[in-house]
Image (cartoon, rainbow, N blue to C red):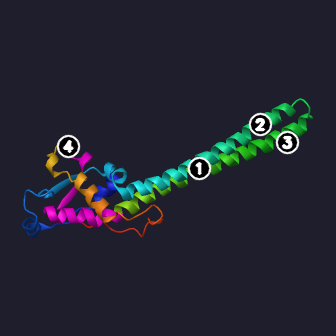
Amino acid sequence: MRSLLAAAFLALAGGAAAQEQFPVGTSVPQAQILTIDSSRLLPGTVLGQSLLAGLAEEREAFAAESERIAAEFRAEELDLTAKRGTLPREEFAELAEAFDVRVQAARVERDEGEAALAARSESQEILFLREVRPILGQIMEEAGAVVLLEADTVLLRNGAIDVTALAITRINEATRSVTPREAPQQPPAEETPEE
């Protein structure tokens, strides 16, 4: 997510006109370079919390289903073990092999489910960034900034140019009515970041 932010919000300049409209002393810092801690945006905003809540519900449901499947296999394994001494060797071997095949198939299915959840999480982060990009661009314009950098990529900086808290406030104001069910489910086509 941090690399996406670093690339996505370059060169949204506002220049001198923005400085005249928002003089030094307001909540928007006047600087050509701003920093932001993108790791705080998703959990720090109402929109981000909504997206995270939806993902958490999916993960919990997936974990519960995985536990149910595992419990069924454990019970079946115990039953199969109990039959080992009462069945002919060939019949037991066939049952054991069939059991192993089903266990392996379930593991593959669960792995695919995990990958799908990870992809959905990444997709929601991309959607979030695209939703808030105009807000961050507006902050840059008001500041007269030409670049917005990920805070962790900067070796030394003055904390006065960090706009994370301001961005969270602005995002919350702009998206206060958004609920998890209203959030878009699929990301739009990939856009080329402005250079």
Q: Is residue 126 above or below residue 151?
A: below
Residue at the spot of label 4: 155
Which range of residues does the magenta coloring cover? 130-155
- Rounded to the nearest whole Å, what is the CA distance between mark 4 and mark 3? 63 Å
At a point 54% along the width and 53% down the height, the residue shown is 58
Instruction: Give, as a three-letter code, the residue at label 2.
Output: Glu
Percent position of residue 83, x then y? 87, 33
Instruction: Give, as a three-letter code, the residue at label 3.
Output: Glu
Type of secondary structure dominating the magenta stretch: helix
- Rounded to the nearest whole Å, what is the CA distance between mark 1 and mark 4? 40 Å
- Rounded to the nearest whole Å, what is the CA distance between mark 2 and mark 1? 22 Å
The numbered disc on residue 94 is: 3
Q: Nearer the viewer, residue 182 or 33?
A: 182
Q: Quadrant of the C terminus?
A: bottom left
Callout 2–callout 3 Cβ contact below 8 Å: no
Residue at the spot of label 2: 77
